[in-house]
Image: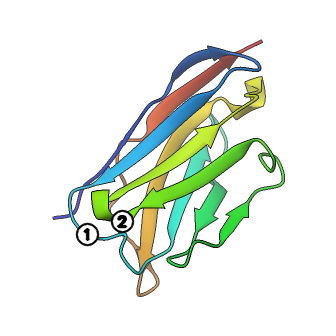
Amino acid sequence: QVQLRESGGGLVQAGGSLRLSCAASGRIFVGNDIHWYRQAPGRQRELVASITSGGSTYYADSVKGRFTISRDDAKNTAYLQMNNLKPEDTAAYYCNALQDGAFFEWGRGTQVVVSS
């Protein structure tokens, strides 16, 4: 069974940076789009950034210009570089890939807390 493991979260002051990683136990990223989502307490999970198998990217307006998504298929790993963090970025962050229209089983996520 494929497992996704997010890491790199933590507590950071506003304006700081974090780099999240997402490691997959199998080669599920190859040929598939990869997505980073986040979920704040009391809110729905929202799409933050995506990267296609060809390297095209998408960013939510709220993170555009501050976050950068990347992938290393050889390492079965995806990344989310987060700069100029804001308190409103506080959330649990999750990654996943779509295959045949369905997500793989979600990982536990990594918590990001941005203090003002």
**What residue type is disc 1 on?**
Arg
Image quadrant containing the N terminus: bottom left
* On screen, residue 97 above or below 15: below
**N-terminal label among 1 and 2:** 1
Q: Which residue is mark 1?
A: 27
- Describe residue 108's horizontal placement relative to residue 63 as left or right: left
Query: Can residue 47 be seen in the rendering of this structure?
Result: yes
* Residue 6, quarter of picture: top left
Q: CA distance from mark 1 to mark 2?
A: 8 Å
Q: Are marks 1 and 2 in contact (CB under 8 Å)?
A: yes
Q: Which residue is mark 2?
A: 73
Q: Residue at x 76, y 20 (%)?
A: 15
* On screen, residue 21 above or below 11: below
Query: Can residue 44 be seen in the rendering of this structure?
Result: no
Q: Residue at x 69, y 45 (%)?
A: 67
Give how far across and how far down residue 35 sits, in percent.
54, 62
**What residue type is disc 2 on?**
Asp
Give how far across and how far down residue 92 sits, in percent.
53, 36
Which disc is residue 83 wearing? none
Image quadrant containing the C terminus: top right
- Describe residue 84's horizontal placement relative to residue 26 as left or right: right
Q: Residue at x 67, y 43 (%)?
A: 43
Q: Residue at x 58, y 67 (%)?
A: 51
* Residue 29, quarter of picture: bottom left
